[in-house]
Image (cartoon, rainbow, N blue to C red):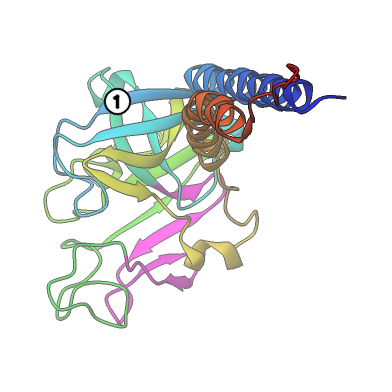
Amino acid sequence: MSGSERHDGRGRLGNALSNLAVAVGCVLFLGGFAWGAVVYKPYTVPTDSMTPTVNAGDRILAERVDGDDVRRGDVVVFTDPTWGDVPMVKRVVGVGGDKIACCDKGGRLTVNGKAVEEPYLRAEGASSLGGAAGAPASPQNFTAEVPEGQLFLLGDERSTSMDSRVHLEDQDHGSVPRGAVEARVDAVVWPFDGMIGRPEAFAALPGGVSSEGPLPLQAGALVAGVVLILGGAAYGPLAARSARRTQRPKASTGAH
């Protein structure tokens, strides 16, 4: 094989690799985007009842889930006629059969008699007891038993949140049906604050906490797709240029 043929072959190989990288990148990017559109739904938070976890005006991504998959500690989007029949964002602190009370001697929320550390609450000099220093996990004491198939929800901004405490006198003791849940909040995307973790305090209770959603995998697919598309698009011309530079002109064979 002549040098020219070798270099032409190298150029064709570089072009093929470039096209392959771009094709795989497109599959990853479009696939990750489509997967995310099916699994997640964007919301804009209208109030500061979940501050500091989620602030008013934040753009969030919430995973579409069945209400039966919700666990204690989840931040969920739900709609219930008793609460105004509009989407609301609150944190699940109790499920069917739980007895929720506040506050114990340390100012903490208790679930079935077990104190819950809540580091996600607004902290004005955070206390090791789960609330703000010198302040209980709820400004008012309360007790509620959660009916089966229901969820008890509180905002992280306990001093202003209109949550299950406001509806304690209702038939369901302030709880909402699991079927009212539309989605589980996984991340704040604008401003970019990242993933919302699952509270460790609830992991020790029966049922544990929910698993992380697929958002990191979807984001990884999008990033990998962009890298392959840009890298593949740049590699093809570079490979062709390199092949041309290494190609040598043929020696003259004329008579002297």
Is residue 168 among what the camera can see? no
- Furthest residue to the front? 256
What residue is shown at x 61% (from left), y 33% (from top)? 68
Task: Looking at the picture, tell me which residue is in the foreground, 141 or 56.
Answer: 56
Image side of residue 26 versus residue 41, left or right: right
- Residue 12: x percent and y percent? 70, 19
Q: Residue at x 25, y 41 (%)?
A: 163
Q: Between 173 and 88, which is closer to the camera in this rendering? A: 88
Task: Indicate the quadrant where residue 122 lies.
Answer: bottom left
Q: Which residue is mark 1?
A: 43
Q: Residue at x 64, y 20 (%)?
A: 15
**Dot 1 lies on which element?**
strand
Q: Quadrant of the C terminus?
A: top right
Density class for disc 1 (Cα within 10 Å; few <14, some 14-19, many ≥20) is some
Judge from the rendering whether residue 223 lies leftward or rightward of residue 51; answer left or right: right
Could you tell me how many numbered marks the image carries? 1
Name the quadrant containing residue 132: bottom left
Magenta-tinted stretch: 92-119
Q: Position of residue 106 (x, y in %)?
A: 30, 82
- Find out whether residue 103 is within the magenta segment: yes
Magenta span contains residue 182? no
Q: Report x, y in % for residue 184.
A: 45, 35
Three-letter amino acid code of the residue under disc 1: Tyr
Residue 222 seen in render: yes
Rendered image quadrant of residue 22 = top right
Q: Relative to the observer, which residue lies in front, 181 or 44?
A: 44
Q: Quadrant of the N terminus?
A: top right
The residue at 14%/43% (across/down) is 48
